[in-house]
Amino acid sequence: MIEARNLTKKFGDFIAVDNIYIKVNKGEVFAFLGPNGAGKSTTIKMLTTLLTPTSGDIFLNNHNVIENPHETRRSFGIVFQDPSLDNELTAEENMQFHAVLYGLKKDVYQKRIVELLNLVELYDRKDSYVKNFSGGMKRRLEIARGLLHHPKVLFLDEPTIGLDPQTRNHIWTYINNLNKKENVTIFFTTHHMEEVERIAQRVAIIDHGKILITGTIGEIIQKADTKNLEDAFISLTGSKIREETGNVGLNQMRISNKLMR
């Protein structure tokens, strides 16, 4: 479903992503892990057409991502790390706006909106303004919005950041259910290793722009000779605290709109 070959991204003399290979199978739940500044966000932006690679090839749902970005965008949904909803619209209006930008017909998206709002248990709040939603409710709505156009792949960049344990548990239950129900391929990042152990089928760990290891959780723990995934992660990437690198100045709402054009 996703294949990146010899993928490299340079910013001047700085190599953010260094000749990596990634392959994600159809219907797989794939965790992409790494410390702050490891190259995760840059990689995701290349996979989702937001950045052009310096070199390498990317294929998603049999589309050449670099040569056919518009066709590729119809194959995936994305939930950004930072909120990208319009707080001055209702939950349903946010969904409708997204559907129109994707060119969905009204008779199609009306039924789909009802289905997805029920899936994330927000149908009873469809007429409520998003500005009055909790963080968890906004995350659930963003997931529902990302699924409107029946994507083959759902990218989730830190989908549970800042949420309490109960809400995080519900979010992953929804994600797991949609993976099984609609066979959506899930590609996600997180710093919560227990989430990875709960849901991921395979894992890749990146650091300093290079893929350090790819495999099942059991394989990674065995190769790192540790007792759990968090210890394996620290063993492979080091115990030094990494500083936040921040974003590259792109407003998340603007990015979301760009993806739909």
Image (cartoon, rainbow, N blue to C red):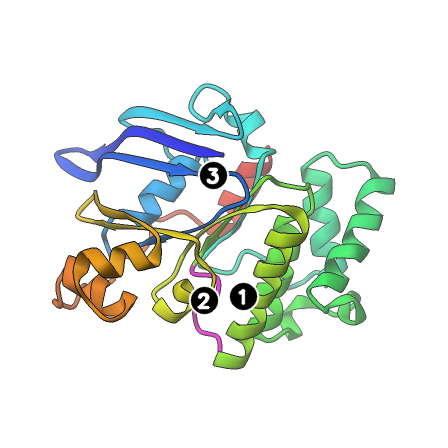
Q: Are marks 1 and 3 in contact (CB under 8 Å)?
A: no
Q: Are marks 2 and 3 in contact (CB under 8 Å)?
A: no
50 drawn magenta:
no
Q: Position of residue 170 (x, y in %)?
A: 58, 72
State the extent of the magenta-drawn residues as a range. 158-164
Residue at the disc numbered 1: 172
Q: Nearer the viewer, residue 259 or 166?
A: 166
Query: Disc 1 versus disc 3: distance between alpha carbons?
Result: 20 Å
Q: Nearer the viewer, residue 110 or 175?
A: 175
Of the residues under marks 1 and 3, which one precedes in the sequence?
Answer: 3
Residue at the disc numbered 2: 198
Q: Which residue lies at the image location 87% right of the left edge and 41% below the top edge?
A: 107
Secondary structure of the residue carrying tag 1 is helix
Residue 243 visible somewhere in the drawing: no
Amino acid at dot 1:
Trp
Q: Are marks 2 and 1 in contact (CB under 8 Å)?
A: yes
Which class describes the residues within 10 Å of circle 2: few (<14), some (14-19), or many (20+)? few
Specify the quadrant that holds the C terminus.
top right
Toward which corner of the image does residue 121 lie, by quadrant?
bottom right
Residue 25 got which mark?
Answer: 3
Which class describes the residues within 10 Å of circle 1: few (<14), some (14-19), or many (20+)? some
Residue 145 visible somewhere in the drawing: yes
Secondary structure of the residue carrying tag 3 is loop
